[in-house]
Image (tube, helix red, strand yellow):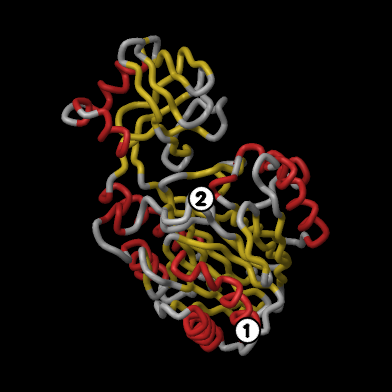
């Protein structure tokens, strides 16, 4: 049996919020105790994060308490942005177990931290595995971390979100047991017999065709399709956006294939990266990632209606994949650039998830970055929502 439940509290008092969210989660799970408690809490509770974790741990008698700070939190009951919020998921399962981990001093040590996470979870790998990671977004070097992790354990399904905050403190926090720290990675491994699916929904939809980078140096693209890169960019976005580059940089992004060798960039097969500079005089554009000559790219536009349509298609595919199987719970790591900032009102993503998947226990937060595999490769996503569904293993 898999027992899972979620609770959400908007109480400004941290201890009261922890008690309310945990009690609701436990009562909905139908189990008075938990193996694993996932906890996400907004910056408003920052002064009392340790008390929050102790309270959840004592109430749920959970050996594994894991989570992070967040600019906003979400569950099946809705989304809390820019206000005090605590989200708790409690889980107990017969067929699989959970194991928490915590690795400090992330800054400048991403590769080693990836290796240390691998070393911490390796002895506990089971038939089916799912790794959840919550790094400090501000000190995270994803490519080095992924390299360190996958060198030790290739093909380990890994998901997560970068810990976030409301912009008032410039620091994020990672939770593990009763430890609260910044500049770290916390997380948990699920291992044993269960089923899971991972889906990524994008806020940024392609505009124009797939292009080829014909000249690039590090993160600066000089030529696209043998023409000045800036010229191709302006052509793709057209007026009025092309008349206001500052505004264009807030809504137009680049979609890059996770594997630079890949010659196709289909829906769901690219990661989004910011445009960080334009040089009309030399015809160049700069991207927040390294780009290779010969690599494919697409320009994409971030807009609410495109994001909504993409989410609906993502959920329709999930329904097909889980047809006839029972869902236990869901995780949703939703970019801080989504939510009411994208749609103009709150609760859209959680309402759609509920509409399509029913009242499954769902927990998540508004993340500084999103982590999920694309194809065979682990990737850092931006402006995306990563939806992870977990259920009992199908009997053969």
Determine if residue 217 is in view: yes
Q: Position of residue 67 (x, y in %)?
A: 58, 65
Mark 2 residue element: strand
The answer to whether residue 396 shows anywhere in this view is no
Sequence-wise first label, 1 or 2: 1
Rounded to the nearest whole Å, what is the CA distance between mark 1 and mark 2? 28 Å
- As drawn, which residue projects farthest toward the right? 123
Q: Position of residue 343 (x, y in %)?
A: 27, 55
The label shown at residue 228 is none
124 relative to 368, above or below: below
Which residue is outermost to the left?
Answer: 240
Q: Residue at x 44, y 63 (%)?
A: 319
Quadrant where the image shows the C terminus? bottom right
Q: Quadrant of residue 71?
A: bottom left
Residue bearing the label numbered 2: 370
- As helix, strand or loop, the secondary structure at mark 1 comes to helix
């Amino acid at each position: 049996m898999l027992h899972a439940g979620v609770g959400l509290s908007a109480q400004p008092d941290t201890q009261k919020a922890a008690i309310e969210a945990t009690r609701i989660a436990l009562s909905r799970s139908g189990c008075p105790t938990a193996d694993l408690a996932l906890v996400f809490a907004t910056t408003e509770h920052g002064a009392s994060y340790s008390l929050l974790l102790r309270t959840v741990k004592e109430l749920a008698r959970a050996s594994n308490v894991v989570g992070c700070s967040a600019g906003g939190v979400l569950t099946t009951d809705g989304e809390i942005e820019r206000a005090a919020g605590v989200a708790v998921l409690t889980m107990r399962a017969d067929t699989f177990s959970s194991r928490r981990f915590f690795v400090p001093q992330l800054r400048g040590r991403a590769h080693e931290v990836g290796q240390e996470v691998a070393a911490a979870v390796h002895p506990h790998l089971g038939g089916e595995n799912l790794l959840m990671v919550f790094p400090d977004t501000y000190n995270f070097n994803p490519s080095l971390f992924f390299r360190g992790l996958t060198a030790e354990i290739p093909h380990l399904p890994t998901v997560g979100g970068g810990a976030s905050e409301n912009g008032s403190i410039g620091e994020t926090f990672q939770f593990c047991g009763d430890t609260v720290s910044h500049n770290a990675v916390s997380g948990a491994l699920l291992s044993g017999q269960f089923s899971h699916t991972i889906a990524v929904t994008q806020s940024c939809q392609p505009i124009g065709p797939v292009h080829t980078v014909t000249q690039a140096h590090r993160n600066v693209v000089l030529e696209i399709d043998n023409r000045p890169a800036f010229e191709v960019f302006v052509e793709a976005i057209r007026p009025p956006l092309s008349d206001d580059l500052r505004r264009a940089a807030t809504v137009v992004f680049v979609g890059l294939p996770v594997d630079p060798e890949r010659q196709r960039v289909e829906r769901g097969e690219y990661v989004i990266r910011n445009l960080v500079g334009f040089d009309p005089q030399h015809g160049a554009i700069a991207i927040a990632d390294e780009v290779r000559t010969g690599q494919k790219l697409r320009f994409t536009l971030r807009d609410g209606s495109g994001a909504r349509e993409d989410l609906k298609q993502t959920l329709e595919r999930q329904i097909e994949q889980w047809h006839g199987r029972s869902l236990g719970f869901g995780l949703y790591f939703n970019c801080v650039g989504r939510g009411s900032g994208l749609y103009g009102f709150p609760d859209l993503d959680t309402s759609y998830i509920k509409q399509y998947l029913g009242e499954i226990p769902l927990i998540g937060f508004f993340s500084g970055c999103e982590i999920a595999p694309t194809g065979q490769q682990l990737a850092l996503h931006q402006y995306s929502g990563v939806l992870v569904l977990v259920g009992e293993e199908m009997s053969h």
